[in-house]
Image (cartoon, rainbow, N blue to C red):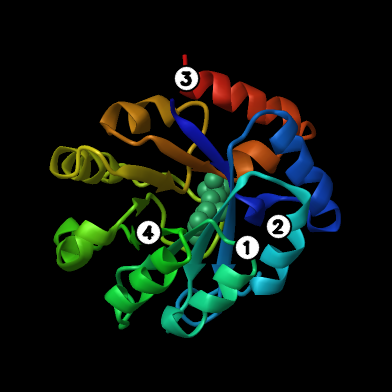
Amino acid sequence: MIKLSPSILASDYMNMGSDIKAIERAGSPYVHIDVMDGHFVPNINFGPGVVSAIRPITDMVLDVHLMITNPEKYVNAFLNAGSDIITVHAECDTDFNFIADEIKSKGKKFAVSLNPATDISVIEPYADKLDMILVMSVNPGFGAQSFIESSIDKIKALRDKYSHIDIEVDGGIKLSNVQKVIDAGANIIVAGSAIFGGDDVEANTREFIKRCNS
Ligand code: DX5
Ligand code: ZN
C-alpha cells in the first residue's frame, strides 16, 4: 500500500482546518507538516503551535518535517504538540542519536531527510534507529518546484540498501511523475501543490491515492 502525505505548506491557510478534513475524508493516512526556520531554509512558516492545533481535529499521522537548524532544541516541543513522525535533516550539525532516543522513548517515529546533494552514506551511523528516510526531490524551502530527476537513482539505491524501511519522497510530485517514484522504491509520497492547488482538495486527494495504488 502506497501512502499519501499531503503537504499543508500548499494549503489555504485561512481554511487550513477544512483542507485537513478534506484530505482525511478522501482517505489520506498522513498529513505532512513542513516546518521552516528561515535559517536552515530561506523560508519561515509553522511552529509547534500549528501541530498542537491540528492534533485534536484529526487521527491522521502527523508527519512533521523539520527544516530547521538545531532540531535537538525543538524535538520535545514537537513531540508534546502531537507529532507522530519527526524528520530532521541529515545536513544538520546535531546529535542524531539523542534525537532518535527522545522520539522513540515517546513511541513515535524517527526519520532523517536527505537534500538532493547529500549522499545516502551519511545516514549509516544511525541507520539502525531510522523508521523512515525522507528523500528531498527538490531543494527544501518552497512548494511548487520541479522534480529533480536524479532523485530516482537515490531512491533506488536506498531501497536496495534498506529493503524494509519506509522511504518517503518529497517535492515536485504530480500525477504525471508519481509512478516512476513508486517504481524506484518509494512507499510514502508527499504532494503539496498537486493536492491543494485547484479547487477540489478532496477530489485531488482521492485521485492521487487511486493513482498511487493502481
Ligand atoms: C519543500 C517541502 C515539500 C513541499 C512539497 O521544502 O518540504 O513538502 O511542500 O510541495 P510540492 O508537492 O508542491 O512540491
Ligand atoms: Zn516536506
Q: Is residue 62 visible?
A: yes
Q: Nearer the viewer, mark 4 or mark 2?
A: 2
Which residue lies under the disc numbered 4? 111
Earlier-in-chain disc, 4 versus 2: 2
Instruction: Look at the numbered disc 1 and say if its residue's Cβ is closer than 8 Å to ligand 2.
Output: no
Determine crowd level at label 2: few under 14, some 14-19, many 20+ residues with C-alpha closer than 10 A.
some
Which residue lies under the disc numbered 3? 213
Which residue lies under the disc numbered 2? 55
Q: Amino acid at mark 3?
A: Asn
The residue at 46%/46% (across/down) is 146
Q: Amino acid at mark 1?
A: Gly
Describe residue 20's horizontal placement relative to residue 100 as left or right. right
Dot 1 lies on which element? loop
Q: Nearer the viewer, mark 4 or mark 3?
A: 4
Q: Amino acid at mark 2?
A: Arg
Measuring from the top left, give residue 127's x and y in whole percent.
Answer: 21, 59
Earlier-in-chain disc, 3 versus 2: 2
Determine crowd level at label 1: few under 14, some 14-19, many 20+ residues with C-alpha closer than 10 A.
many
Q: Is residue 177 visible?
A: no
Measuring from the top left, give residue 136's x and y in whole percent.
Answer: 38, 54
> Looking at this view, is 76 or 210 the one in front?
76
Task: Give the CA separation, mark 3 to mark 2.
Answer: 27 Å
Determine crowd level at label 4: few under 14, some 14-19, many 20+ residues with C-alpha closer than 10 A.
many
Q: Nearer the viewer, mark 1 or mark 4?
A: 1
Q: Amino acid at mark 4?
A: Ala
Task: Give the CA separation, mark 1 to mark 3.
Answer: 28 Å
Task: Give the CA separation, mark 4 to mark 3.
Answer: 24 Å
Dot 4 lies on which element? strand
The residue at 62%/34% (across/down) is 28
Which residue lies under the disc numbered 1? 82
Dot 3 lies on which element? loop
Q: Nearer the viewer, mark 3 or mark 2?
A: 2
